[in-house]
Image: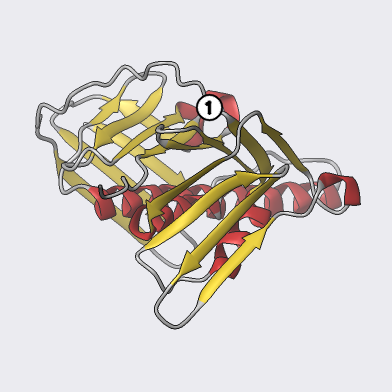
Amino acid sequence: MFELSIDEKRPVEEDNSQKRAKKQLEDEEKSTIMRTALFRKIIESVAEIVDDVDINITQEGLSIQFMDAMNVTMMNVFLPESTFDMFSEDNPEFLNIKFETEACTADYVIKLQNIGSESYNIPAIEFTAEAEMKSSDFLMMRQSAGNFAEYITVEASDSTINLSQSGEMISSKTKNKAAETGKYNIRVNITEEVSVEISMKYMNCVTKTARYCPNIKLCLGVNEPVFFEFKLKEGGHINYFIAPKMDEE
């Protein structure tokens, strides 16, 4: 059985300084809450896109890679072994996931099936616009753009990244402020202006996981999928490739 566990009550080694031990415990608890929430949001995002998925577990960690039935979105996840408080691979037929807090323990045993998902080799893509920023800043932009249309426009123009929507009764546009103001930690590199529309359904999946990752990288290209990258500790990552809406001719 593959066994994964995130334990909020993981013991902390004794320290001569009570203050240092208390801080260490607080850091442990905060880390546990974030790791638990992130794992749950990853599963929620997967469930929003597909009904079945292959989960690959090795000694290095847990990985998920899939594309939806319409070939619009691909999600690529790798969580290193260190993400979990306990990580073992004794029986490949079952997956046991345990969440433990001070109040309760949630234990799930899942019978695994091989659904024969394809493995995708991602070719190199020449993006014409890249931006890196804090996930909190990206989420603020995304929230300000609204949630009243089926699609959201992502645009790279004049050294800024813009998010906009247009509905029947209202339209919105939000853009990042220049890094030169000293208030925002953002890096933008635009070699060619580009504007694409992507489905709000998939953008909302991106924002689910963005809340629990420190930074986000966003890449755009002409006639290319929009790439969202979240880097995690020790080589972990969560990547989304979302195909833009095609113009109707």
The x and y percentages for residue 156 are 61, 43
Q: Is residue 72 left or right of residue 4?
A: left
The x and y percentages for residue 37 are 47, 55
> What scheme was used to colour the molecule?
secondary structure
Q: Count all numbered tags in the image, as a single digit.
A: 1
Question: Extreme bottom residue here?
Answer: 169
In the picture shown, does residue 88 fall above or below 41? above
In the picture shown, does residue 148 fall above or below 179? below
The x and y percentages for residue 56 are 27, 26
Say which residue label 1 marks.
127
On the rendered image, what quadrant is the N terminus found in?
top left
Quarter residue 142 falls in: bottom right
Visible residue check, residue 159:
yes
Residue in the picture at 65% in, 56% down = 136
Q: Nearer the viewer, residue 221 or 146?
A: 221
Question: Extreme front residue here?
Answer: 249
Residue in the picture at 44% in, 83% down = 169
The x and y percentages for residue 52 are 15, 43
Q: Residues within 10 Å of mark 1 (few under 14, many from 20)?
A: many
Q: Nearer the viewer, residue 135 or 149?
A: 149
Q: Is residue 111 left or right of residue 139?
A: left
Q: Amino acid at mark 1?
A: Phe
Quarter residue 143 falls in: bottom right
Quarter residue 230 falls in: top right
Q: Secondary structure at mark 1?
A: loop
Residue in the picture at 26% in, 50% down = 248
In the picture shown, does residue 184 fall above or below 216? below
Visible residue check, residue 9:
no
Residue in the picture at 60% in, 65% down = 173
Q: Nearer the viewer, residue 170 or 100?
A: 170
